[in-house]
Amino acid sequence: MNPFFFRSHAHAHSHSHSRHHGSKHAHHAYPDTSDSLQTPVPRRPSIQIDNPSPSKPVPMASSLSTSAVPTIVSYNTPPATPPLAKDEEPTGIAWCTARARIPTPDGSEYFLHIYENSKDKKEHLAFVFGDAIRSKSLDKVRWNETEMDRIKRGAYTGRLRNTDSSSLGTEFTTASTETTGSTASLIPLVRIHSECFTGEIGHSARCDCGEQLDEAIRLMKAEGSGVVVYLRQEGRGIGLAEKLRAYNLQDLGYDTVMANLMLDRGADERTYDVAQAILEDLGLNQIRLLTNNPDKIEQIEKDSQIRVVERVPMMPKSWEAIELGREMEFEVKEGAVENKVVKGKELDRYLKVKVERMRHMISIPSNMSI
């Protein structure tokens, strides 16, 4: 359940500008898609150009058919009609750049949001369940954009449906700034979750991160509303390589806190200002937070309008089974969201350190031996 997203890099046009035009106004070729949205994009024909003159436009080959030659338009030409609003550069700590519907195997779905931010070069995520919670920065009208531009980045309401071979369906409307904000009557569940490759993908029994993520998703599916803010701060903020070095120190007998300190790192270097900004962008001023960590509550509420009206504990499933005297019945099943759990002595030691040295609010089972 650990999604990885790679940043796409816009193709640089500056080298072609100076060579073919000698001007700051670039001209780009786009295919004619007026017949149908399903029409394949023709390949741009290769043209040999010998010593182009910077003062004259490069002519197209006369032998090329009209249908194969893309229309040339000016990229920098302002629109004939002004847009609804002129959007300035993104401001604040975090802003949403894309959103799309993600169906899941059990028939439910959520909208995955991608956030850029001013703190680091990572893309952080938000899994949004339900239709009432919306991003203000995503829905904000941008300068010189078309309706299709808004659809492509996810600034619409409803569901996109391709009803025939020539047009988009009508089960959506493009959103504006007036349609943003949460209208849900129930205060939503929120999980602020930090990336854990080893626990979510690598099936590690050193932590319960994968179990916590899947349990949060299960609860939000059941309620039909909620947000998982997924922060790309692996290993409590020290990164994956340092995390593996800490694992080696743990194998020598040091606990998770001491292992980090021996690497000249903090016991927990995570910050939550980006998460705070994401929640504010989603219009969530009151939340029920799924956490055992008081530090998250303190950082989320600090200098913000967000209030954690309820802390929802995340009891490790293996500890819950011990507490109920059902440890012998406890079965580990990997893979399915409803059954992805972890247990073992290494997990027990890890959790015990979080309780005793990091203030985590979990009750250690009285009849558990470590």
Image (tube, rainbow, N blue to C red):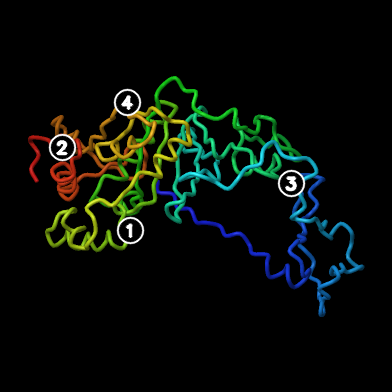
Q: Is residue 23 left or right of residue 274?
A: right
- Residue denoted by label 1: 239
Q: Judge depth for marks 4 and 2 and give the one in front.
A: 4
Q: Is residue 64 above or below residue 322?
A: below
Q: Is residue 366 above or below residue 43?
A: above
Q: Secondary structure at mark 1?
A: loop
User: In this view of the protein, which residue sits in the foreground, 132 or 268?
Assistant: 268
Q: Judge depth for marks 1 and 2 and give the one in front.
A: 1
- Residue denoted by label 3: 38
Q: Give amino acid for label 2.
A: Met
- Residue denoted by label 4: 309
Q: Residues within 10 Å of mark 2 (few under 14, many from 20)?
A: few
Q: Is residue 209 above or below residue 20?
A: above
- The CA distance from mark 3 to mark 2 is 58 Å
Q: Judge depth for marks 3 and 2 and give the one in front.
A: 3
Which residue is at a point 19% across and 58% down the rendered structure image? 261
Which residue is at a point 24% across and 39% down the rendered structure image? 331
